[in-house]
Image (spheres, grey):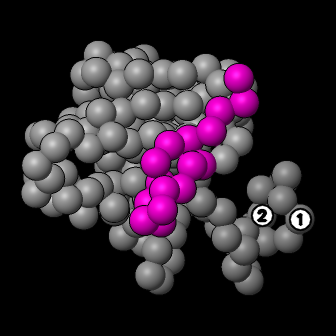
Amino acid sequence: LWSLVILEAWQRAFSMSKSKIKVCVVGGGIHGASTAYHLSLMPNAPEITIVERSQGSSASYKSGGFLAREWGSGSTIQLHQKSFDLHEKLAEYLSLQSFRRIPVVGVSQREGHAAPSWLDGVATTEDLAGAAAQVTPAELTSRMIEEAVKKGAKVVADTAIGCEIGGDGKVKGIKLQN
């Protein structure tokens, strides 16, 4: 989701550029895949290269993919809600087979109420219908990269080991291991 926050600023920069901007996304995990995918959707999209040493080897492919819409608090609640809603839209756009809403029950301990047998102490439960979902992160990540590639992104199987800085202090390229 962090990538969506900066995409608006990038979109303004891309639309003002007179030449095609080149973007190198280092890492093909969930953040890199999301960045490449959302950049590829932009009008006047940049030339995108994703550097990933081995697709499917990162933590993004192995996590549980549990999504909770209403479980944030304070200043993060809107981020939880927006992220959940975005995952649901992505599941539809990308035809994700693994996305599913799941039933959850909230449990809280309160004085004077009977606790479930598996809980030490006293508790109450609350049905949190629609508040959680699950998606297979490997499917989500792979599909975002596939869609970015369909729109012209390239994937380079290698490891980024540094960057080349020009005399003006700007990044001129990415150094690869191989």
Of residues 30 and 152, the one nearer the viewer is 152
Range shown magenta: 163-178
> Eyeballing the image, is 126 above or below 14?
below
Of residues 16 and 153, the one nearer the viewer is 16
Q: Position of residue 11 (x, y in %)?
A: 19, 54
Of badges 2 and 1, nearer the viewer stands 1
Q: How many marks?
A: 2
Q: Give amino acid for label 1.
A: Asp
Q: Which mark is residue 120?
A: 1
Q: Position of residue 107 (x, y in %)?
A: 66, 63
> Eyeballing the image, is 63 above or below 97?
below
Residue annotated with mark 2: 115
Cβ atoms at labels 2 and 1 below 8 Å apart: yes
State how far apart marks 2 and 1 are (Cα): 7 Å
Of residues 136 and 147, the one nearer the viewer is 147
Q: Position of residue 118 (x, y in %)?
A: 85, 52
Q: Earlier in the sequence, mark 2 or mark 1?
A: 2
